[in-house]
Image: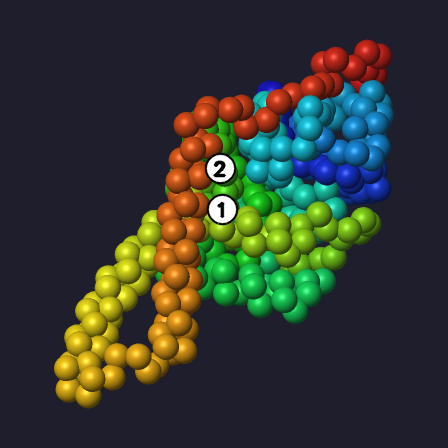
Amino acid sequence: MKKELISVVVPCFNEEENIPLFYREMTKVMEDMHYVSFEIIFIDDGSKDHTLLQAQKLAKEDSRVRYVSFSRNFGKEAAMLAGLETAKGDYVTTMDVDLQDPPILLEEMYRSIQEEGYDCVAARSVSRRGYSFLRKLFTKWFYKIIAKISSTEMVAGARDFRLMKRKMVDAICSMKEYNRYSKGIFSFVGFQTKWIEYENTERVAGTSKFNFPKLFAYAMEGIVGFSTTPLLISAIIGIFFCFFSFIAIAVIIVKTLVWGDSVSGWPSMICIMFFLCGIQLFCTGIMGEYMAKMYLETKKRPIYIVAETEEDLPGKIDK
């Protein structure tokens, strides 16, 4: 009987130190899970170091290792999509190469799908070990906000690390939107999902490529992609200040007619003008963000461009 195949999708950006370490840990898991077959797909997201060389080296030595190399850096979301579209497995998992997603959990995930009938088993971090105070605070409030404004369920602490059946992977790949937020897409497609909680671990090597500005932009991607509430908020703010302005005009007219004082209070008036201009720019910015996403979607540009795969590599040897 043919063994079921698990595809392990691993996005990489300047991760030459971590690839050998990840492969070593995955080798142990593959040996323990001898009852299934594996393929490991490294997605080189336009790395500037020797990430591609490390992937090429492993692909030559082990037929289970595959890789996709982008023509430039397209971002982790594009790398994840490329891996899902390339994967041949009956089950597909997405994992970080820095081992913050423990490969040892794969066996528990697989058994949960087999024995309990789930379509997906996902990992949820219950700690923020290794995160800065600002990142912990930002992450906490982001999940609180998006849980209230989005109709798509967002689980606090959710990782991209999950094992999915092929039908769920196909559903995700069918969503060709250019502006991608995978955590939201995973929830949007539905399917029965079991959550496994675990303690967050620090990177085994290298440094995180997500600084605070990138995390903030990623959070905005999630909010704009899965909620129109900010547009409603800007409309409510506009109505409120329109109502407030009518009251202010009435007060000024009455004050001028009764006391004849139409000049005093200019400093406070200037402050109010600056405040209202700020509110207008804020609301315009919200609408502009949605329009920018629409603009990018209508251009129909490819989400990623492949420069090379293991098929272009001569001399690949079975292990």
Judging from the image, the colouring scheme is: rainbow
- Res. 109 image quadrant: top right
Q: Is residue 272 left or right of residue 176?
A: left
Q: Residue at x 50, y 43 (%)?
A: 181
Q: Which residue is denoted by mark 1 in the rendering?
A: 221
SS class, disc 2: loop
Q: CA–CA distance between discs 2 and 1?
A: 7 Å
Q: Quadrant of the C terminus?
A: top right
Say how many tags the image has.
Answer: 2
Dots 2, 1 in contact, CB < 8 A? yes
Q: Amino acid at mark 2?
A: Asn
Q: Which residue is denoted by mark 2 in the rendering?
A: 179
Mark seen at residue 116: none
Residue 76 in view of the camera: yes
The residue lying toward the viewer, choosing from 273 and 90, is 273
Look at the picture and state if 111 lies above or below 219: above
Q: Residue at x 40, y 72 (%)?
A: 270
Mark 2 nearby-residue class (10 Å; few <14, some 14–19, many ≥20) = some
Q: Quadrant of the N terminus?
A: top right
Residue positioned most to the bottom: 259
SS class, disc 1: helix
Look at the picture and state if 85 lies above or below 215: above
Residue 53, given in percent of the width and then of the height, sits at 83, 27
Residue 139, given in percent of the width and then of the height, sits at 56, 61
The residue lying toward the viewer, choosing from 196 and 226, is 226
Residue 187, given in percent of the width and then of the height, sits at 43, 45
- Res. 176 image quadrant: top left
Mark closest to the chain's N terminus, 2 or 1: 2
Q: Residue at x 30, y 79 (%)?
A: 263
Q: Is residue 233 left or right of residue 2?
A: left
Mark 1 nearby-residue class (10 Å; few <14, some 14–19, many ≥20) = some
